[in-house]
Every structure is written in structure tokens, then in C-alpha cells.
Amino acid sequence: MQYRRLGRSGLRVSTLSLGSWVTYHNQVDTGQAVEMMATAFDAGINFFDNAEVYAGGKSETIMGAALKQLAWPRLNYVVSTKFFWGLDRNGDAVNRKDTLNRKYLMQAMDGSLRRMQLEHIDLIYCHRPDPHTPIEETVWAMSDLITQGKALYWGTSEWPAADIRAAWEIAERHHLHKPLMEQPQYHLFHRKRVEQEYARLYGDLGLSLTTWSPLASGLLTGKYQAGIPEGSRGAMENMAFLRDGLTHAAKNEAVAKLQPIAAELGGSLAQLALAWVAKNPNVSTVITGASKLAQLQQNLGALALLDKLTPEVMARIDALTAPLAE
């Protein structure tokens, strides 16, 4: 395993990490989580990603129970969660969903700590921007959570570059804890935000990325070239919003043309896609997901392709995928 610094901090995270979106509770129970997290840890993965909203809080509960069973030294792993959506999706409590106000953040933090059975969470994120709460209020609240010892670092997820810069400048001005990392979607067909919008932030602010969906929800494994297979993520009713993208004809055609390149490098399509994301020097860690142990084990092979992604190979990959990227 390789390790990279998270932004300008001294914290080092594994180049590949393991996330829980979609899988925990929906496809993975506590026993399976223990098995996969142990396999990941043994392979050198030290970062495990979560969010309050995943499976309505049950994902955090499963990960917390798994961590308790695994009983690793707390210094040996990094765990995250994210706040914004809230858990009361169908209720009328206006300060409990779609917000980053101080009241919500303080109480959401305590809820995540209880579910994860932890005294602190290493990384906390603002899961989406909140146009209705002043950024200054959010920055103060996130910084205070770190000062209180409930979290160690904070960052954003899917925030516009202008908002990230504004948050950083507020923290700088008031000597608060600055946002350290951003968690954007990033893969071969979704790259403009990472490669263009955020371009100035890496050098100016020291921003680094903990990216999600490196396989485009499975599109980049090649499994959707003939439609939606039974038991796949695209077949899940709560993931129906992904189907148009997964069956996109031109993208699936490009995926088929990537297959020979992956084979030349001695890897699978999924490994090629993961390695491509990890090749970006601004990416601290690539968050992977798996519903089965075999998927996790295959994903771990992606690191063997990193050095094989020469400028010539990268150009061939870009010729097939960049014209279709958002």
C-alpha cells in the first residue's frame, strides 16, 4: 500500500480506502463489514469513509460495531463521516435536514459519535453546500467541533470552488481550523470540477481530495454493457436514479474500448479506472466500495497498474473518455 498526506496536514492516508455508501446495511451486514474491513486493513488500507445519511444512520452503526469487534489501536485507522442531509427526511424539523447551521452540526456530531461508538471522528465533512446558512457560521461550528476534540480535521464534499475558498479565508482571518480536504465525485467520465474548477485551490490552499465513485457506480467495470444485471447496484430500487448513466450507450462503447488497454497492462477494467484516479497527484485517497469480498480483493490490485500508466497510456485513455466527460 502507498500512503499520501492529506492536504498540508501531517496525516497520511492509504491511496485506496474503503467506503460504505450503498453497501452497509443495504448489502453488507456487520459480519461482512468485519470481514471486508479486516481484509482491507491487512492490505494496508487505513481510511474508512462513512456519512450520517448513509442508510439513515445504519451504515455508521454497522461500521461502529465492526470497529468495536476488530479492536484495532485507535491510532492505526482513520474514519470519517459527513453532515448535511440529516436523518429526519420525512419530518418537519427544519433544523434537522439540508442544513449546515450550528445547531444541526453540533447535534449531528454527537449522533455520529454514538452510532460509531467512538470518542472522536478523524475527518468530518460538510456533505453539500448550504446556501441558506452563512458560510461563516458553518466554519465556526466545524472549527469548534475540532477544538472540542470531537473531530480532528474538517473538509467539504461537492462544494463549489468559490465557497471552499471563502471558507478557507474566513478560517484564516479568524485563526480557526481551516477546511483541509474536499470529497468530490471523480472518474473517467466526471472530471471537470476536479481538473478545472478546483485547479487553483491545490496550490493556493493546499487542498487535497478524497474522491468518491471512481468506478462511476459500476459503469467502469463493464458490467452494464448489456443492460442492468440482476443483483447489481443499478438494479436496486433506491439507486434507480443511476440507471440512465449506467446504460449510456456512448460511455459503454468507450468502456469496451478500454478493455484492451487494461489487458495490455495486466489488469481489469476496474483496476485501470481506479489507478487512473490515483494517478492524479491532488488525490490523497480513492474511496472504493464493495458488496463482496472478491470485489475488494480485485480493487486492491489497482495499485500494481499505477507505474504502468505512462503519458502515452494516459493519452490513449483520454482519447476514449475525455470527450464524454462532464
Image (cartoon, grey):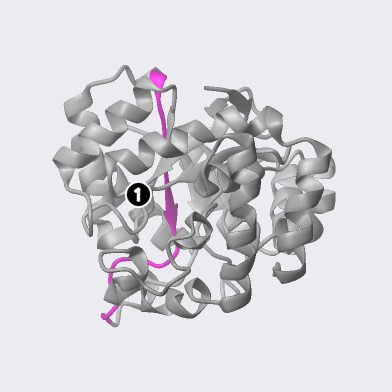
What stretch of residues is rendered in magenta?
76-91
User: Which is more toward the observer, 141 or 256?
Assistant: 256
User: Which is more toward the observer, 285 or 58?
Assistant: 285
- Give the image location of residue 153, x and y in percent: 54, 37
Quarter occupied by residue 243: bottom left
Q: Which residue corresponds to mark 1?
A: 20
Left or right: 42 as drawn, with respect to 210: left
Q: 275 above or below 325?
A: above
Dot 1 crowding, Cα within 10 Å, few <14, some 14–19, many 20+: many
- Name which residue lies at 63% across and 22% down: 10
Left or right: 306 as drawn, with respect to 106: right
Q: 257 above or below 78?
A: below
Q: 152 above or below 253?
A: above
- Name which residue lies at 54% across and 64% down: 128
Asked if residue 114 shows in the view, the reply is no
- Name which residue lies at 56% across and 56% down: 157
Is residue 86 rendered magenta in the image? yes
- Give the image location of residue 283, x and y in percent: 66, 40
Q: Amino acid at mark 1?
A: Ser
Asked if residue 13 shows in the view, the reply is yes
Quadrant placement of the C terminus? bottom right
- Name which residue lies at 58% across and 42% down: 263
Q: 268 above or below 76?
A: below
Left or right: 245 as drawn, with respect to 110: right
Label 1: element kind: loop
Count every numbered label the image shows and give the total: 1
- Give the image location of residue 133, x and y in percent: 57, 70
Is residue 15 rendered magenta in the image? no
